[in-house]
Image: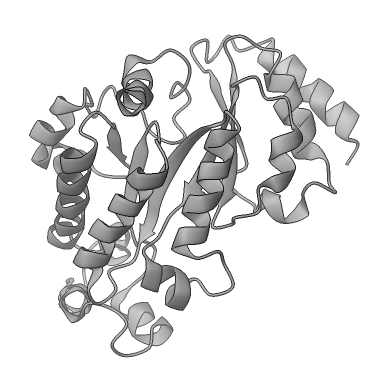
Amino acid sequence: MNLDAWIAHIEDGLASLENAPRQCLFQWDNGTDVVCWEPEYGGTKLLVELFARYPDKYLELYVGKSDYVDYLLKYDHRGHTICCWSLGAETQCRVVEPRTAGMEQRIASARICQDAGYTVRIRLSPMVPIAGWQDETRHMIRRMFEEITPDVVTIEPLRFCTHQSLVDDFEPGVLDPEFVEAMARVPADADQWAKSQLPDECRNRMYRVVLDEIARISPRTPVAFCREQRRVWDAFAGDMSRMGQHPDDYVCNCGPVSAGSDARLANACASAMR
């Protein structure tokens, strides 16, 4: 790819946002593991420098499950690049996500970027219901807030799986058996979406642990659900209201207006600086 032409194309797009005039966040990239090609590829540097010139536009860089961030420390981002990690509990990283950075390594790399002036945010996605997930999730959240100040946390349990794929893809004993059994009880005539995710009661159990622990440690940090249905948002309306979040008006990791001067994001960072 001609990177100069690519950047020029992006600049043209930023100058003509009539169909999305409020959009201020732009992703690099939600479809590929960009960091494995950098800094040799050079696209990230060009994007960071591009968005640094726009007072009201922000780049979101998906670091994902990596801890490779040293090359970012040389870039003049001017506070307009947001770095995002997919964070999993220790056993999930080691057993389910082999050959990726461990939980502590991901948190450490986020701390490095935060110390370099980048805004950091976290996706607990996917949350895999490993055996003992409750305690491991609480430990992960504690360690996260001991080291970094994410401006928002988005949560999403394991999706795009069926009971059979859980049986085929995971060694016996890795997953919480209650969750596997719940997937087995999903009716055969359920719609495809219902058959490809954990049942509501399972997802809600995971959400409850995360929301309670974040509320205990950092109550001003906004939390959002990813790809979740309205009835689940409604089930946690009280929790969300305390953070200023609502299914019709919320900040999340990759929402097009989830950057800049939004008070929910600013308050999350300011509360930990005191």
Residue 235: x %, y % from top left:
9, 41
Q: Is residue 256 left or right of residue 205?
A: right
Outermost residue to the bottom: 172
Outermost residue to the front: 274
The N terminus, quarter of image = top right
Instruction: Between residue 57 and residue 100, name the one nearer to us.
Output: 100
Residue 90: x %, y % from top left:
39, 68
Q: Residue at x 60, y 22 (%)?
A: 80
The C terminus, quarter of image = top left
Q: Residue at x 32, y 57 (%)?
A: 140
Q: Is residue 63 left or right of residue 169?
A: right
Q: Residue 121's quadrant in the figure?
A: top left
> Does residue 12 sit above or below 143 in this rendering?
above
Instruction: Between residue 156 and residue 262, name the one nearer to us.
Output: 262
> Does residue 134 sit above or below 174 in this rendering?
above
Q: Residue 135's quadrant in the figure?
A: bottom left
Can residue 138 be seen by looking at this rendering?
yes
Residue 165: x %, y % from top left:
38, 79
Instruction: Between residue 50 and residue 256, name the one nearer to us.
Output: 50
Q: Is residue 33 left or right of residue 266?
A: right
> Does residue 218 sit above or below 19 in this rendering?
below
Residue 106: x %, y % from top left:
51, 55
